[in-house]
Amino acid sequence: MEKKTQSSQRLVLFPCPYQGHINPMLQLGTFLHSKGFSITVVHTHFNSPNPSNHPEFTFFPIPDGLTADEISSGNIMAILLALNANCKASFEQTLTEVMEKEPQNKIICIIHDDIMYFSEAVARHLNIPSIMLRTTSVTNFLARSAVLQLHSEDHLPFPDSLSLNPVPQFHPLRFKDLPTSNLDTFENYSKLAVNAGNVRTASAIIWNTVDCLEQSSLAQIQQQCQVPIFSIGPLHKIAPAASSSLLEEDTSCIAWLEKQSHKSVIYVSLGSVASIGEKELGEMAWGLANSNQPFLWVIRPGSICGLNWNETLPQGFIEAVGERGCIVKWAPQREVLTHGAVGGFWSHCGWNSTLESLSEGVPMICTPSFGDQKVHARYISQVWRVGVQLENELERGEIERAVRTLMVDDDGEGMRVRAKDLKEKIEVCMKRGGSSYSFLNKLVELIMSL
Ligand SMILES: O=c1ccn([C@@H]2O[C@H](COP(=O)(O)OP(=O)(O)O[C@H]3O[C@H](CO)[C@@H](O)[C@H](O)[C@H]3O)[C@@H](O)[C@H]2O)c(=O)[nH]1
């Protein structure tokens, strides 16, 4: 068989324009580029990635048709539905122009985020093979089908009395852990979920997960799916140098970490989307202060109901914690989690944060906000047993106890040991002969054969 020269083979990536989706897509691009493919990223103007972070890629922004009102509404579901409706023509036109301009650099495949499902229709129309990238866990995907099923049988919204009951066939998920969304109407949620969930003509699904974390869910999904599934994660470890931050990282926190003792710091971040109220902010602040542990806290601009954190932190808090606390607007999270001073991560349990923490053996405190985060929080605390979930409204006493359990008390020792073991299991999956390693090779072979 004639060996194709990869450098003349172009892969087009279309990420979903949110941080938790851009990161794994560009990490995947970095890996595929290292295998000799040329990478073109077509993206929306909205939340566009910074090309200077990836000089090895070609970037093409396309008009996305979002209005200023839509963007400022912050309604993510509505924005995603609008992007799927608006971007089809401009994506197709851009691809046609790219192909006309450089016919020798053939587009051999379009890899798109499953939420940007319109891309698949464009690929089909232009007769280009496509592959989906899924950026959340397989278990969440299965649980989402349960949500759609419950809704079709008129069981949603479920009564509060059911909240702690187990969902049949989804042990250990309870009804309250199902990935329902409080972000928008159920109609919009299901429209997105159904469209992103359908595999129409995609040649394969790439999943940013690791076999050792989701073995039974992966076996289940592979049975349901007609196309190959490549579980090649954790992508941030596969392409460790790739940075794609939309916000500027404040690296001064690394100098602060250098001054802290081994495994003493609790790192706190609720990701790029979740927000909290002023009251919750106050409880978090005093819980951290009273725990007596050093903490590094990311308070993203706009994440406290749009208010400025300098004005919303409780009076006397900054003075009370002094040098023991470091607050930044955005951190180099992956670097933070690999730092020896970090001994725990208080997280909203977005899938990237979950993978980033598990890969470094850092145990977690979980406060999920919406969707898949609730599934991951349950898995962290009950399946992998490497963390504690705060189940009630945030309250300073419970926070203080959770921090101490996670970081210092004897009853948290089991969690800390299991977190270390899980890190080692993930490393085995990434080494030669491991599942992620093998799937990455198979993925390259599949792309070459398209
Ligand atoms: O100060 C910070 C905070 C976060 N991050 C990075 O930002 C990403 C955040 O991703 P994630 O933890 O997945 O959270 P979200 O930003 O909330 O991600 C969205 O997308 C994820 C993937 O689909 C879902 O799991 C989440 O529920 C959804 O909210 C991670 O790579 C972090 O390393 C930083 O670099 N610096």
Image: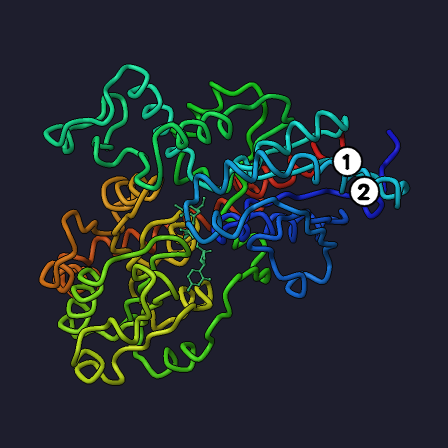
Of helix, strand and loop, which one carries label 1? strand
Residue 293: x and y in percent read 21, 73
The image quarter containing residue 325 is bottom left
Q: Amino acid at mark 1?
A: Ile
Of helix, strand and loop, which one carries label 2? strand
Residue 211: x and y in percent read 45, 37
Distance CA(mark 2)–CA(mark 1): 6 Å
- Mark 1: C-beta under 8 Å from nearest atom of ligand 1: no
> Label 1: few (<14), some or many (≥20) within 10 Å?
many
Q: Is residue 403 left or right of residue 112?
A: left
The image quarter containing residue 141 is top left
216 vs 67, nearest the viewer = 67
Which residue does the numbered mark 1 point to in the structure image? 108
Q: Where 374 sits versus 345, above or below?
A: above
Residue 96: x and y in percent read 81, 37
255 vs 408, nearest the viewer = 255
402 vs 418, nearest the viewer = 402
Marks 2 and 1, the one that precedes in the sequence: 2
> Label 2: few (<14), some or many (≥20) within 10 Å?
many
- Mark 2: C-beta under 8 Å from nearest atom of ligand 1: no
Residue located 17% across and 82% down the image: 320
Is disc 2 in contact with disc 1, using a CB cutoff of under 8 Å?
A: yes
Q: From the image, which quarter does the N terminus lie in? A: top right
190 vs 55, nearest the viewer = 190
Residue located 40% across and 64% down the image: 337
Q: What scheme was used to colour the molecule?
A: rainbow
Q: Is residue 81 left or right of residue 90?
A: left
Residue 298: x and y in percent read 35, 67
Q: Amino acid at mark 2?
A: Gln
Give residue 124's mark.
none
Q: From the image, which quarter does the C terminus lie in? A: top right
Which residue does the numbered mark 2 point to in the structure image? 9
